[in-house]
Amino acid sequence: MQLLYVILCIFFFVEAIKHHLLQWFHEKNRKIEDGYNYEIPHTPAKRAKRSEDSTNSSCSDTWSTDSVQSSETEGDCDDEPSDDIADLSLKSARSIMLATFKVLSLQHLTVRNHLLPLGKVLKVKCRSQGKYEMVIPLAKALIDAHHVEIESEGIINYKNILRKQVKVVTAIDELL
């Protein structure tokens, strides 16, 4: 009985591989019929060009590198440091929100389930804003309400806060 089961599993596995290869060949033939030439080098799309250009600058506020590693290893911006919370940058606000919600990426946060309820609790008006526009006022409100502290030697640079500098005083579960 087990031998029959093993034979059936192998058969279905082989059939799945055949099916996948046939789909791939059909897609390749369809693209060739549509005029796609695999021989010539292709230039990247506009979106890819923009992301390549923005990853070269360490001070950019793009969301293409939205991981823990990139937010902790990015260098200081060329701008002069600012100790005024009004100068909080998008990158710094993103680091604060990632540490507060204990997530690896802003993609894991939703406006409806995470950011709007936090805005209600903190009494921040950000209803008509998108996810990335909401991050800055929410981060400022978290700092002002002392739910989050920034650990720094000397003066705090609000233009370049790293995730490892953010200390969450009040857990997000207690706030919401």
Image (tube, rainbow, N blue to C red):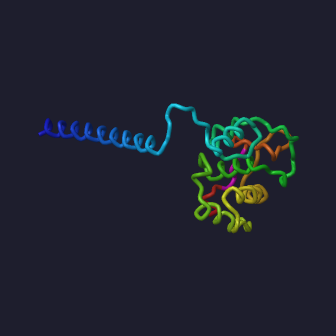
Q: Residue at x 73, y 46 (%)?
A: 61
- Residue plotted at (30% across, 42% down): 19
Region of the chain picked out in magenta, as a range: 166-170
Which residue is at the front of the view, 68 or 90?
90
Q: Position of residue 64 (x, y in %)?
A: 64, 44
**Residue 13 sits above or below residue 124 on the image:** above
Q: Quadrant of residue 49?
A: top right
Q: Is residue 156 left or right of residue 91?
A: right
Q: Is residue 127 above or below residue 26?
A: below
Q: Main secondary structure of the magenta part?
A: strand
Residue 67 sits inside the magenta stretch: no
Q: 79 above or below 127?
A: above
Q: Quadrant of residue 20?
A: top left
Q: Name the residue nearer the viewer: 22 or 139.
A: 22
In the image, taking residue 153 as reference, residue 109 lies left or right, namely left
Residue 45, given in percent of the width and then of the height, sits at 62, 43
Residue at the image position 71 percent from the left and 38 percent from the top: 53
Quarter containing the C terminus: bottom right
Residue at 60%, 65% (x, y): give it: 112
Relative image position of residue 77 (x, y in whole percent) = 80, 39
